[in-house]
Amino acid sequence: MIFNRAQRRSAARRKPEKVRRQVNPAAALNPILFSTTLEPSETVVLKLHVREAFEAIRTGTGTKDDFDNLVISYNAWQVLAENIDTILCERLLPAGLALMRAKERVLAGKALLWDGRAIEPMQEFMDIYDTILDNISPKQVQDAILEGYRRQTGHKLNKRRYL
């Protein structure tokens, strides 16, 4: 297309439209955040999200969303573990290291896969995840997700906007 001088000047003065990006770090846990009580069927769905993400990465079909779901869950459960017992925090630490190794692997241009040392710690994390999820209130989960996000990024989330 050929533009005349007035059209070129108008385009140069025009401000670009703002792109609104909304990030919801708790997307994997939305069912629990908006419920008042957790029924067994709801906890099963939440547990399956984490296990499916783990299996997808283990088999090499995992996506960034799968990895993000695991990281969000891990960060929230690390916050909860700090409130429960320090031994639980120590049991979760190898899973966090496995997540960091997987991220480093992707940043190095390799596939999103677990290394050999990651399988056992991640399975232990999922077992801890299941146990805590069975015995926790939705408010505690919401607060843990917000705190985990704050620690990861250094920013607070506006509860009304995202949760």
Image (cartoon, rainbow, N blue to C red):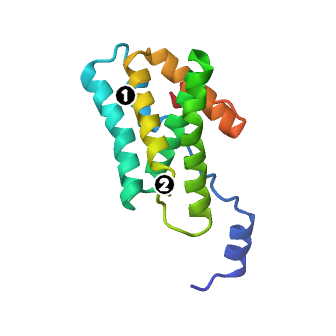
Q: Amino acid at mark 1?
A: Pro
Instruction: Categorize mark 2 by other alpha carbons within 10 Å: few (<14), some (14-19), many (20+).
Output: few
- The reply to whether discs 1 and 2 touch (Cβ–Cβ < 8 Å) is no
Query: Which mark sits nearer the N-terminus, 1 or 2?
Result: 1
Q: Which mark is residue 112?
A: none
Residue shown at 72%/80% (left/top)?
5
Residue 56 in view, yes or no:
yes
Residues 46 and 36: in front is 46
Residue furthest to the bottom: 2
Query: Residue 31 has which mark?
Result: 1
Disc 2 is placed on an element classified as helix
**Residue depicted at 36% across the width and 50% down the height:** 55
Q: Tell me which amino acid carries mark 2.
A: Lys
Q: From the viewer's perspective, is the residue at label 1 or at label 2 nearer?
A: 2
Residue 42 vertical placement versus 13 (above, below): above
Residue 112: image location, x then y, percent: 48, 60
Distance of label 1 from label 2 (alpha carbons): 21 Å
Label 2 sits on residue: 64
